[in-house]
Amino acid sequence: MTRSQFLLSAFPFLYRGRALAAARPPNVVLIYADDLGYGDVSCYGASRFKTPNVDRLAAAGVRFTNAHSPSAVCTPSRYAMMTGEYAWRKPGTGILPGDAALIVAPGRETMASVLQRKGYRTGVVGKWHLGLGAGDLNWNTEIKPGPLEIGFDYAFIIPATGDRVPCVFVEDRRVVGLDPKDPIQVSYGKPVGSEPTGAEHPELLKMHPSQGHDNTIVNGISRIGYMSGGKSARWVDENIADVLTEKAQRFIEKNSKAPFFLYLATHDIHVPRVPNTRFVGKTGMGPRGDAIMQFDWTVGQILDTLERNKLAENTLVILSSDNGPVLDNGYKDEAVEKNGSHLPAGPLRGGKSSNFDGGTRVPFLVRWPGRVKPGVSGALLGQVDLLHSFAALTGQKLAANSGPDSFNVLPALLGDSKTGRDHLVEHAGTLSLIVGDWKLITPNKGRERTPGPGGHELGNFPEARLYNISEDVGEKVNLAGRFPEKVKELSARLETIRTSGRTRP
């Protein structure tokens, strides 16, 4: 078999009645923002500030208007995207503490292992939040299992979130810059060591908590959880974006001669929002707005690196977010006071943690200059589909037990089809089901709004709600009373999905 025949059989997507688009399979770069809402970038309608680099990506690719994170909060979204399995199927996949064990079983198929199997060099840089180790983790020795055990060749990660201890980077299996004479201790039950806490020493804080977030102080900011030691390894919040961006750039440059997959999971715009001084004051909207500017800068740096290394034409770049937006999320950072007329979720109702579409309908951009024509698509997509779509991208078939909820939506991703999934389950306080124009929110007795000033609706109701989301994108008119048979039909279908253990045929 000639090389051209091999590429034709292994990578049929490259051919659409045209010449071979590339001499090798495409690189893949996935930029995954944290808490970035549907309306938080200017190509999706933000007007109080501009995000020129995100817009640059959108202008050269496909902007999706009905793409969803798997959950309305972080860990479940990341688990589902990584494994192709809805997180609500697996107990223990809620928002994890910083000392949680790895929740993806080593050896399980992941979006990284699918590409690694086809010869891709795979790397993850940024927020992890899928757990590390197998329990009783010792941060001062080799840390495993972790990313290297589930499909990544390289890892430079924030173990959990910026507001949770330990506030250190882990590269491959070791804490970066750790002095063995100053060992790390971490606890989510009781204080360890003699480190000051925000609850006891608010005078030491440069950013004060609005709710919770009052345990160990690191870099003048109190966190969730207790930590002692590791002084030389602790990050400086103002430099996190610079450090992660540089590591991502180095990964691209180091692996520019062979196909690579980079999963860049930014800290921005999650709390604590402490952007570099270069971005402070850029939006007039306080740290949250300025963190969006910092995120946009990161996107620009990655795009520039691809172009500088002559990789842009054959690199599939995907940008999205792990869930919808939130203003007050635990710190007094003026997100509410300076938000003004900005609509973080755009025309959508709700936000992070919400059953309304503001919780999971997120920005989703795809660019591949050598292959994808620019445009806008309303295809229904889920990030849970990336595993199966990456398999299709590289000419592979998934094993029967892999990615149980992951569909092959590659034609929609590449702009060849305006049709994506035929249905999608959303996950927040309860489960919701989207089928065509209809969305069902199942009953839930949770709280009505997120806490604190500027809180948004969570979409928890004691009775089922039904919306026509093609005509009513803001989910304002409940049609359950007018269409009880549709409620019954969708409820039955969702119950079948819930109990079946899989949705992939």
Image (tube, helix red, strand yellow):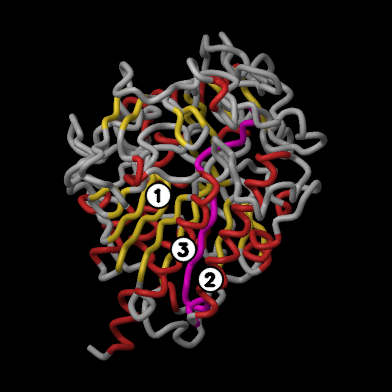
Callout in the foreground (1, 3): 3
Q: Of callouts 1 and 2, which one flags the residue occurring earlier in the amino acid sequence?
A: 2
Contact (Cβ within 8 Å) of mark 1 with mark 3: no
Amino acid under label 1? Phe
Amino acid under label 3? Glu
Whether residue 314 appears in magenta in the rendering, the answer is: yes
Which residue, given by chain and number where applicable, does mark 2 sit on? 368
The secondary element bearing badge 3 is classed as helix
Contact (Cβ within 8 Å) of mark 2 with mark 3: no
Which image quarter is the C terminus in? top left
Q: Of callouts 1 and 3, which one flags the residue occurring earlier in the amino acid sequence?
A: 3
> Dot 3 surroundings within 10 Å: few (below 14), some, or many (20 or more)?
some
Query: Residue 354: in sight, yes or no?
Result: no
Callout in the foreground (2, 3): 3
Left/right placement of residue 244 relative to residue 210 reads: left
The secondary element bearing badge 1 is classed as loop
> Dot 2 surroundings within 10 Å: few (below 14), some, or many (20 or more)?
many
Q: Depth check: 68 or 8 in front?
A: 68
The secondary element bearing badge 2 is classed as loop
Q: Of callouts 2 and 3, which one flags the residue occurring earlier in the amino acid sequence?
A: 3
Q: Position of residue 415 (x, y in %)?
A: 57, 64
Q: Position of residue 108 (x, y in %)?
A: 21, 47
Q: Quadrant of residue 167?
A: top left
Separation of residues labelled 1 and 3 (CA atoms)? 33 Å
Q: Which mark is residue 407?
A: 1
Q: Position of residue 307 (x, y in %)?
A: 54, 77
Q: Quadrant of residue 475?
A: top right
Query: Residue 399: in sight, yes or no?
Result: yes
Name which residue lies at 49% across and 26% down: 428
Which residue, given by chain and number where applicable, does mark 3 sit on? 246
Name which residue lies at 59% across and 39% down: 273
